[in-house]
Image (cartoon, helix red, strand yellow):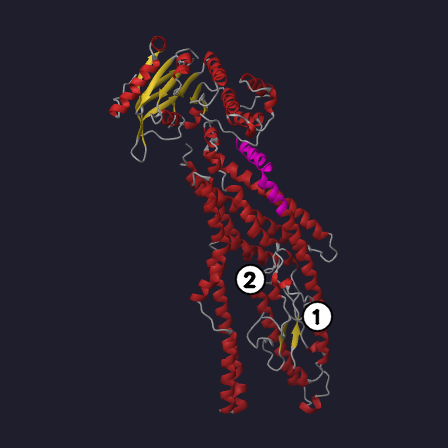
């Protein structure tokens, strides 16, 4: 797949919940192969709602989502073959070992060719020591569970990876190792959409950064802009604008 | 993928605390119940044998016409062996009954009813023939196999199922599963199959061991037909457990939290297992009311006294048998209607349907009860006919007849006939059908609800 292939296309994506809350407001977003897009935003900005729409867990009120050119709402099962998801707090089957969890989700993803060696390698790659592979997950720390979540995403061999605040609650070392893994996946050609509050990590790793407020991307910065600008100031500016005005008119990319 | 879900459910359940508890509980209850009921059956069989022997002696004593006319004949129906699995109505059906000779009408000395079949032959305070004087045996009735399945296993099935969906939502593993190209019906079906197998596994082991312990008992020798019946009782238990697992699963798809689905499932359990089956007879009694048999007997006796005063013995002889017969028929028909209404109302509950089907297959159900009652009534008629024939043939008149021996073979034998396998199967078909309908309907409800289940 070429570097510029669009893996994710959100067009006019809108979600109004039953209680009339506008969670996502005419969002337009493309993510390409080999790109990390960091979505910054305060709590309630609509980041997770956007991810849920991309995963087909809720139906859009308006607009559409395409993963690898497949409309998520028209053909969800086909679209899901190309996407992997790691949540903020990966929860797996506590009574299964890391290896059993990985095996279950890998087979669920349709991969029947995975060997014990593959499992071992991917778990080592994510930083899980070998002694932990056969330990029950209920005894794992959050960092270990996040690593296992990434291992599951890697084994799925999906092109698009969605990460929902994956580094929150991780210690600095764990956070850095996690970002290194993501960087490796980008190099392998994956497109990554990561929601986060962590401006510094976003600046460090993102190819593009989008600031989300009131359900829309109010500003999208390219790599050069990210490097040049004071992202923290910019982010706080948009957030305070939102607090002042309640809602910002959407700035579509 | 379906296999993966089933495998996952099985593996997770097998290492869970509830599986260990269920295995121990089912082993103790099923194996224990089968053996206690087998001991109980052996005791009842011994009572039956001694009863038959004793009452055969009584018949030998009927050696004169007045005695044939005056005394009664007591009969002893054989207890059903499959009462080990479902005791059902067998304690009533296998109770000795007496046909008083002077009328050759059904009677019950203890309670004075002419019309009753199956009421206790209590004389004083002790059931006749019982070798157990310890009242604790009556206070704590042994649970039969069907009782264990109906009460305990249905509850365990719910405890295995209530968090199948809501629990995975809470732990967010459902979301992770659904990020894959996995149809929701596959998840639901896999969970149902995997979860049901998890509970059926200890059940099957306990059932197998229980059945083996029965086979090595010298006093239990199931005929081929009994084996087929046991097999159907086993299949009915499987269906019933699958239904209750689905009830838990349905409520799991209706709740975002497993604590909510547990409360809802337990409410459904109480409703289906305890409330509906017990409420149905009460409701049916409101619609089809009945006078107590004693009241009818007293009314007959009052009319009889009036007739003696106005017309004497001739009138009594001419009118009373017809009146008795008409009242008795009407009373029995009404009883059947009341019972039938109660059965139909209670069939709203899968628990009642399961009990009806299982007891019918064990030969201790409602249809067996009515069929056995008809058999008893037929025997009463048979005895009456034999007596009439004897009186007609006896040319000796009363006084000389006192010394004429009544041959034992003049007294017809009681044929203790139970329903055959095909009749039992036919009778339990509707309840089997109800369980299958429940399975399909509950799965459809769970499926439709799960399709729109919010996994976020």
Chain ID at mark 1: B
- Residue B429 point in image, percent of width and height: 53, 54
Residue B220 part of the magenta-drawn span: no
* Quadrant location, the N terminus of chain A: top left
Residue beneath the point at 68% across and 50% down: B211
User: Compared with residue B191, is residue A86 higher up or lower down, i.e. above or below?
Assistant: above
Residue that label 2 marks: B367
- Residue B443 visible within the image: no
Residue hosting label 1: B52
Q: Residues within 10 Å of mark 2 (few under 14, many from 20)?
A: some
Residue A43 placement (x, y as % from top left): 36, 26
Helix, strand or loop at label 1? It is helix
Q: Do marks 1 and 2 share a chain?
A: yes
Residue B198 falls left or right of residue A246: right
Where, by quadrant of the figure, is residue A168 drawn?
A: top left
What residue sits 42% from the left and 12% below the top?
A204
Q: Secondary structure at mark 2?
A: helix
**What residue span does the magenta drawing correspond to?**
B1-25
Where does residue B225 sit, x and y in percent of width and height?
Answer: 65, 55
x and y percentages locating residue B449 in the rendered image: 42, 40
């Amino acid at each position: 797949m070429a570097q510029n292939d669009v893996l994710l296309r959100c067009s006019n994506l809108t979600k109004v919940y039953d209680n009339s809350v506008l969670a996502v407001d005419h969002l337009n977003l493309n993510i390409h192969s080999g790109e990390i897009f960091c979505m910054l935003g305060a709590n309630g900005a609509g980041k997770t709602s956007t991810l849920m729409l991309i995963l087909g867990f809720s139906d859009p009120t308006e607009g559409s989502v395409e993963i690898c050119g497949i409309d998520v709402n028209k053909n969800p099962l086909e679209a899901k073959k190309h996407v992997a998801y790691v949540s903020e707090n990966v929860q797996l089957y506590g009574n299964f070992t890391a290896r059993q969890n990985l095996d279950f989700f890998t087979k669920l993803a349709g991969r029947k060719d995975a060997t014990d060696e593959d499992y071992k390698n991917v778990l080592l790659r994510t930083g899980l020591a070998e002694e932990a592979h056969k330990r029950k997950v209920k005894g794992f720390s959050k960092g270990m569970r996040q690593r296992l979540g990434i291992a599951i995403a890697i084994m799925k061999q999906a092109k698009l990876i969605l990460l929902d605040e994956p580094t929150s609650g991780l210690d600095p070392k764990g956070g850095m190792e996690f970002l290194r893994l993501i960087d490796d996946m980008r190099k392998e050609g994956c497109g990554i959409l990561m929601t986060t509050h962590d401006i510094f990590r976003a600046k460090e790793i993102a190819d593009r950064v989008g600031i989300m407020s009131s359900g829309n991307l109010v500003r999208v910065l390219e790599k050069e802009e990210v490097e040049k600008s004071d992202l923290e100031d910019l982010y706080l500016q948009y957030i305070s604008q939102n607090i002042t005005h309640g809602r910002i008119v959407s700035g579509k990319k | 993928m379906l296999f993966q879900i089933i495998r996952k459910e099985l593996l997770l359940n097998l290492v869970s605390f509830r599986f260990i508890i269920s295995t121990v509980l089912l082993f103790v209850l099923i194996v224990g119940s089968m053996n206690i009921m087998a001991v109980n059956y052996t005791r009842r069989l011994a009572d039956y044998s001694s009863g038959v022997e004793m009452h055969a002696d009584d018949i030998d004593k009927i050696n004169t016409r007045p005695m044939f006319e005056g005394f009664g004949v007591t009969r002893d129906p054989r207890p059903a062996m499959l009462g080990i699995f479902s005791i059902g109505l067998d304690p009533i059906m296998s109770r000795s009954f007496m046909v008083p000779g002077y009328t050759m009408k059904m009677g019950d000395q203890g309670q004075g009813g002419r019309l009753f079949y199956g009421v206790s032959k209590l004389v004083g305070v002790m059931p006749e023939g019982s070798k157990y004087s310890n009242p604790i045996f009556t206070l704590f009735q042994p649970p039969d196999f069907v009782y264990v399945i109906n009460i305990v296993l249905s509850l365990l099935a719910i405890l295995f199922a209530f968090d199948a969906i809501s629990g995975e939502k809470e732990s967010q593993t459902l979301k992770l599963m659904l990020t894959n190209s996995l149809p929701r019906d596959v998840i639901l079906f896999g969970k149902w199959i995997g979860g049901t197998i998890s509970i059926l596994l200890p059940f099957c082991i306990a059932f197998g061991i229980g059945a083996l312990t029965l086979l090595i008992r010298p006093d239990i020798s199931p005929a081929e037909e009994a084996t087929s019946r046991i097999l159907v009782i086993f299949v009915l238990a499987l269906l019933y457990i699958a239904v209750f697992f689905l009830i838990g699963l349905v409520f799991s798809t209706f709740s975002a939290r497993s604590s909510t689905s547990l409360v809802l499932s337990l409410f459904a359990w109480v409703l289906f297992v305890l409330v509906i089956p017990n409420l149905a007879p009460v409701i049916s009694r409101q619609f089809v009311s009945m006078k107590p048999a004693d009241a009818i007997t007293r009314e007959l006796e009052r009319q009889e006294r009036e007739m003696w005063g106005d017309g004497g013995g001739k009138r009594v002889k001419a009118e009373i048998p017809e009146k008795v017969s008409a009242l008795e028929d009407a009373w029995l028909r009404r009883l059947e209607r009341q019972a039938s209404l109660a059965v139909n109302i209670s069939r709203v509950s899968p628990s009642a349907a399961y009990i009806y089907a299982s007891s019918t297959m064990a030969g201790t159900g409602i249809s067996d009860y009515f069929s056995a009652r008809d058999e008893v009534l037929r025997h009463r008629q048979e005895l009456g006919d034999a007596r009439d024939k004897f009186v007609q043939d006896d040319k000796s008149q009363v006084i000389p007849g006192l010394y004429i021996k009544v041959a034992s073979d003049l007294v017809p034998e009681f044929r203790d006939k139970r329903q055959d396998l095909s009749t039992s199967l036919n009778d339990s078909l509707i309840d089997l059908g109800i369980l299958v309908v429940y399975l399909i309907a509950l799965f459809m409800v769970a499926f439709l609800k799960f399709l729109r289940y919010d996994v976020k």
